[in-house]
Amino acid sequence: MSRMRVTTGPARREHRAERRARADYTGGVYGSMLAASVVVGAGSLGSFPRAELVLLLLLTGVVFWIGHVHAQLFGARLAQQAPDRRVVWNVCCEEWPIVKAAIPPAAAVLAGPLFGLDVRGSLWLALCVAVAGQVGWSVAAARRVGASPRLMVVTASVNLLLGLLIISFKIFLKH
């Protein structure tokens, strides 16, 4: 049985900083797009539509996170090395932005009444928040790898276009 080394103090902060420096935000882009799609597909919810949509967003994010972790672990990684806690933990952390991306749209659904929005208005707010997250995650990813400002504008534009495409599905595919 292998034991994980516990780090404390400055070594732990250094490890966290190193992990953040290697962070890959593509899962956040994907998760935001997934959240927007969930909102579009939510159409007719039951008697507690806000709670159901919040659960649908969060649980869908978790299921896709598990799917991505599984794909990473049983794809290329395990063919090259035996599974251990460290590898599993690292993959779980790398893919976590998929779940994190579902939280702002879920919060928007819950916050809708604070802005005087009915369920439909809250759905639109959640959709806009998801698309904004998608654009934000893509710019963060580009910035993290040192992309030029021009490339950051390109990635933001492509992700905004994809988000607007998802919004157009909601407009044209009325529930």
Image (cartoon, grey):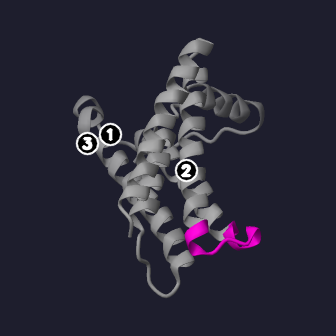
The residue carrying mark 2 is 130
Q: Could you say which is closer to the camera, residue 166 or residue 143? A: 166
Q: Distance between the Cα atoms at labels 1 and 3? A: 6 Å
Residue 28, disc: none
Write the residue at 64% across / 62% down: 108
Q: Which residues are magenta?
A: 111-121
Residue 113: say if magenta: yes
The residue carrying mark 1 is 72
Q: How dense is the environment of label 1, judged by Cα within 10 Å: few (below 14), some, or many (20 and up)? A: some
User: Number of numbered discs present?
Assistant: 3
Residue 74, disc: 3
Badge 3 marks a residue whose secondary structure is helix
Residue 11 at x, y percent in the picture? 71, 30
Badge 1 marks a residue whose secondary structure is helix
**Relative to residue 11, is residue 145 depicted above or below?**
above
Specify which label sits upstream in the sequence, 3 or 2: 3
Residue 127 at x, y percent in the picture? 54, 55
Q: Could you say which is closer to the camera, residue 55 or residue 167? A: 167
